[in-house]
Image: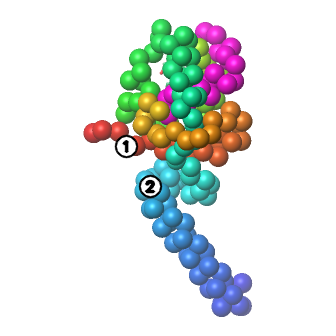
Amino acid sequence: MHKHPHIPSVFLLAVVAASVAAGSQMTAQQPGPRLAALNHRVVVQDSGVYSDAQAEEGTAVYKKTCAECHELEEFTNGDFKGKWGGRPLFDLFEQIRTTMPDGDPGTLPREEYGAVVSYILKLNGLPSGPARLSTDSAALAAITLKLPAAAP
Ligand code: HEC
């Protein structure tokens, strides 16, 4: 490669330009180490990923199935944001689907898991949109969960 020094230089320049482009794009979205780590994925969808009706259904699921063990505050506090923020929404969905309700995991219809996740998004102040949150694994994996920073 050192026999053709100008070729790698051009290549390097292209890489630098691409990094700068990616960097400024991320700054426009939301700066932060977690997003930086997800740089290669750069599918950042942060609003309107669930519908109001779906969050309403999720409220009912929560009351029926989750409230006996959980306080709502557990899904919006600093620990929660720190653990799930910046990660694919699929991670949260799958964690809930495969472990909850505790002692009886996976027993809800997939749509109910999607509804309760929508409710959690709403609790965190994320805006709803016209379409329902898909419960398809790949679709969920393409959404990065952007939670506003926790209060200090
Ligand atoms: C029978 C009690 C029980 C029920 C019902 C239950 N959970 Fe849990 N849940 C737990 C326990 C116990 C943990 C583990 C707590 C821990 O170790 O952090 C947990 C953990 C979680 C976590 C992980 C929290 C985190 O950040 O690590 C989520 C999310 C969660 N539950 C959501 C739900 C949802 C949504 C429902 C209703 C569909 C539900 N749970 C129903 C007992 C329950």
Instruction: State the image coordinates of residue 57 (x, y, percent, origin top left).
Output: 57, 22
Q: Residue furthest left?
A: 152
Instruction: For residue 90, say whether it is visible.
Output: no
Q: Position of residue 143 (x, y in %)?
A: 60, 45
Chain-order first, disc 1 or disc 2: 2
Left or right relative to 92: residue 77: left
Task: Inspect this view and state whether residue 31 appears.
Answer: yes
As shown in the figure, which amino acid type bears the numbered disc 1? Ala
**Location of residue 11 by image quarter:** bottom right
- Indicate whether residue 73 is drawn in magenta: no
Residue 39 horizontal/vertical position (percent): 56, 57
* Residue depicted at x 59% and y 41%: 130
Left or right: where does residue 138 sit relative to residue 90? right
**Quarter holding residue 55:** top right
| Magenta span: chief secondary structure | helix
The answer to whether 132 is drawn above or below residue 99 in the figure is: below
> Circle 2 is placed at which residue position?
30
* Residue stretch in magenta: 102-121
